[in-house]
Amino acid sequence: MQPRDTDHGLQRLPFRVAVLVGLCALGTLLTTLLLETQAGATAYIIGESHWSKAQQRAVHALYRYVDRGDPADLAEARRALDVPLGDRDGRLALERDPVDMAAGRAGFLRGGNDPRDIDRILWMFRLLQRAPYFRQSVEHWRRAEGEILRLVELADAMERQRRAGPLEPGQAEAYQREVLAIDARLRPLELAFSRSLAEGAHAMRRGLLLLAAAVFVLLAAYAVRVMRSTLHRVRETESEFRMAFHQSAVGMARLDLQGRFTQANDALAQILQMPLPRLRQSRLADVMLSEDLPARDDGAIDWAALLEQGERRLLGAQGRMRWVRWTASMVAGRRPGQDHVFVLVEDVSDAHALASEMAHQASHDELTGLINRREIGRRLSQLLGQAKLRGDRHALCYIDLDQFKLVNDTCGHEAGDRYLCRFAGIVEDCLRRGDWLGRLGGDEFAVLLHDTSLEQAETVMARVYVALAANAFQRDGRSFGLNCSTGVVEINAGAADVDWLLRAADTACYVAKEEGRNRVRCYRESDQTLARRRRELDWVAQVRLAIAEGRLLLYAQKIEPVDGGRGGGLRYEVLVRLRERDGQLYEPGAFLPAIERYGQGMLVDRHVIDAVAAQLAAHPGHLQRLELCHVNVSAQSVVDPAFLEHLGGLFDRQPELASRLCLEITETAVIGNMDDACRFIAAMRARGCRIALDDFGSGMSSFGYLKRLDIDILKIDGVFVRDMASGESDLALVRSMAQVGQALGKETIAEWVDSDATARRLALLGVSRIQGFGVHVPCPLEQLIEEDVLARPAIAAAPASPIMAS
């Protein structure tokens, strides 16, 4: 037989078993039916006996009642008649549509039937009432019930006659003859009922016996066939298994409970590079590493542990180790003590080597071969846990190369890669046993000095710096020093977490760069410079969290005409406030310098511009009446093409927004990035935005740059406006700025206006608009928009500003 036929036969085995089960069930059912039918017939025969005896008692009692007229005889006759009448009520309940099972059960109980036989009487009547023998029995039953009803009527007539007076001798004889006549008619009916029922039971019994015998023969024949077929397939399967065992590409073996190989295939011999005869004479302890072979206290193999699937190491010829996937199962023997273990062994050495390589790549930098940021974080977390548990102290050094960008820009990226590798090699050579070096990314590295305090770390890093100074990187005839700035922080039980360690070391490194580069700076909580940098880093983290949690709020301050008129409409500058979780508000001066110092200005700018756009889109009526909404843009956003692209996408989605925006850029941002600023200004003006030069005058070289800048508005720095009343120099500077703005056709806005006297001086100087706490106290942008919507119908009667109103 072909393997396909064997498989097909095995697939049919469940069906064959199901047939066997079905035949057994059928035989059991037939036996049950036979027994129940016999019991049901017996119950009816017993019931008929009760019926006959009750009828006889009734006849005798009525006969005595005719003679003596004793009411006790009549009562006995009625009690006896209640038995056949109960059976009659039970039968009529079963013949109703629908069947009344409760009434049928109650009737047959009145008929004196055993309560245990009631269910058989009920189901037999329902199932067999139209069967040949049982139908005849029921017909005899009905005819007999007619005579019973005649006895009931006769008893009632006797009772009425007795109440009327004594019976005449002729009347008594007539009643007695009638009673005997009914009794004579009932006897043959009773015998016919029992005989028909017995004959039906015998007939059904014979039929069921024949059917049961046929089922048994069929069951036996089918069982023999299934057994022969199954044995045939078992032999074929065993033959195929032996073939598969020896020809399989997966190693297979059978071992006894002492670990001896009782069988093994060629694949396992090839995995171990061992002759098969030699392998079959070996023990498991000869080929498995002792670390992977579990043992009990008595030295025997711990099979419970060894049956667990997993990877293990086997030793082959010449001690060559192979990683294998081990799958073992216990096979019960025919007799106690003959159990054995069947093992599947798959060679996964190549996969294991690949996984190890991938794990190494996942935790190491591809260029330098050092551990990467992820592995650095993992190791630092482990060391920090040990420090908190045992009080260990280590030092983490955060290194940033000083000349990497110069090498990259002048010699190319390939030279930059070699520069990094050269630096890493020199530093590694200077480290002690237990120390390690990792690459955080770019030109940033981390050094872990094991069991080292801050003071000892400075000594170790001094040796590193000496080694770096003694070497140089040569490229294209040029020499570059391996200079770096280093921040050191101590890993101890007081450190919060790994992020805190990296931020603290980075802060110290940043200070080292500010102090002149190529030096080491240790992080100490008492150091004010480091504390300031630490606070700035905290502000960066707080701002990011505030943006994520919706706590970076938009405020607005109105910009009013200096002469008190309404000008062209409502104008205001959008300001930001940071609300702490406890409700405290911080103005931008507290956190924006840190944001810009650490290059996060565009993060805030994007949030503000998107939030402003959403507010204005939600109030289209306000947007139509709005003249200008001023929004500040940091120098980092001005020079970043991604921010320009973001604004372009925003204006594509909301075309009506651009003409209502005035983007304010600081004078220092323009001076430091003139070409980028000009490109940004041109792109935004082409979209319809207006541009304001914020803090005008603070750069001290503004006038010369104004010719190149295509701006619309000059915002005079509030420092000069605030001190106009106390110094002629500030007044002269503000006058000159206003005159420059007028000469160039630019609108001028004065900031920090806090009194009506300052406003009047600015009006005389030719300033167009004013802004400050004396004009309008900043309020939430949403509140300002709602006030504008509510006050718009009565806007003509409202004063222009607090100063002008005064």
Image (cartoon, rainbow, N blue to C red):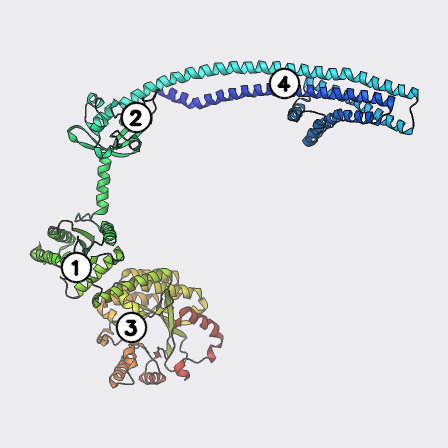
User: Is 328 above or below relative to 625?
Assistant: above
Q: Which mark is residue 454?
A: 1
Closer to the chain start, of discs 1 and 3, is 1
Quarter of the image holding residue 657? bottom left
Label 4: few (<14), some (14–19) or many (≥20) C-alpha neighbours in 10 Å: some
Mark 2 — residue?
342
Label 3: few (<14), some (14–19) or many (≥20) C-alpha neighbours in 10 Å: many
CB atoms of marks 2 and 1 within 8 Å: no
Residue 685, position in %: x, y?
Answer: 32, 68
Foreground mark, 2 or 1, reads 1
How far, Cα to Cα, is label 3 from label 4?
Answer: 113 Å
Closer to the chain start, of discs 4 and 1, is 4
Direction from residue 422 to residue 63 in the image, left or right: right
* Kind of element beneath mark 4: helix
Mark 4 — residue?
38
How far, Cα to Cα, is label 2 from label 4?
Answer: 56 Å
Q: Could one spot residue 264 in this view of the protein? A: no
Closer to the chain start, of discs 3 and 4, is 4
User: Is 630 above or below relative to 149?
Assistant: below
Quarter of the image holding residue 605? bottom left
Direction from residue 65 to residue 317 in the image, left or right: left
How far, Cα to Cα, is label 2 from label 1?
Answer: 60 Å
Q: Amino acid at mark 4?
A: Gln
* Kind of element beneath mark 2: strand
Closer to the chain start, of discs 2 and 1, is 2
CB atoms of marks 3 and 4 within 8 Å: no
Residue 115, position in %: x, y?
Answer: 66, 27
Q: Amino acid at mark 3?
A: Leu
* Kind of element beneath mark 1: helix
